[in-house]
Image (cartoon, helix red, strand yellow):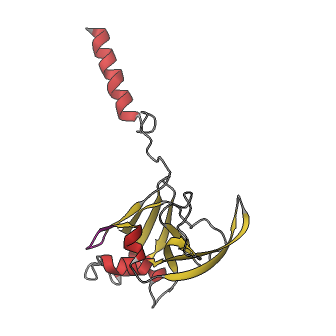
Amino acid sequence: MTFTRSFAILALAFSLFTTPAQAGEPACPGGYSNQFRLNGQVQNPARFRLFDLQYRPSSIVTVSFFSGSSGFVTKSYIGVPLIDLLNDAVIITDNAAHRNDILRKYVVVGGTDCYEVIIAVADLLSNFGHQQVLVAFETGDGQPLDASEGMARLIVLNDKQGGRLVSNVATITVRSAP
């Protein structure tokens, strides 16, 4: 009886302190993403696939950045402005509780490999930063992104480093600072 109880306690402790990746289930499998979700503090959460992006007004941009693995890189992309997707989703604000609540909002963009970056919503707004950030779905010559970039890739213009260029976008989540 003591052995059985000890084994049960050990099994319970193992299950409580083991992450899914340790238990054989990859938490961040990586790989190609054929869709992403826009969710969080929005009125209209949505799922986007390639054709959803292709039928929206898009822009073409050329970015140049330093990549640790490839050196200096210049590429062109076609994509939908992130602010357009956020405007359609309607960010939830509470100006009664927090003055200029929109300025407290930020977006977490995550890839299938759990790589995440943060973009302040104010940086996207035309009356503040007006920074051009795209959710790209094609190369500048109209070809689909390659498998390493996924169906959608976050493109941040004017960044000197490529660190905020998220490949294989899986989630775009709107959050609020505490």
Is 69 placed left or right of 175 in the picture?
Answer: right
Q: Position of residue 140 (x, y in %)?
A: 59, 76
Q: Residue at x 28, y 15 (%)?
A: 5
Location of residue 172 by image quarter:
bottom left
* Quadrant assignment for the N terminus: top left
Location of residue 96 by image quarter:
bottom left
Q: Nearer the viewer, residue 111 or 19?
A: 111
Q: Position of residue 163 (x, y in %)?
A: 60, 65
* Quadrant assignment for the C terminus: bottom left
Is 21 placed left or right of 156 in the picture?
Answer: left
Range covered by the magenta-colored residues: 41-47
What type of secondary structure mainly makes up the magenta span?
A: loop
Residue 60 sits inside the magenta stretch: no
22 is higher (above) or lower (below) than 89: above
Q: Residue at x 46, y 48 (%)?
A: 28
Q: Residue furthest bottom?
A: 127
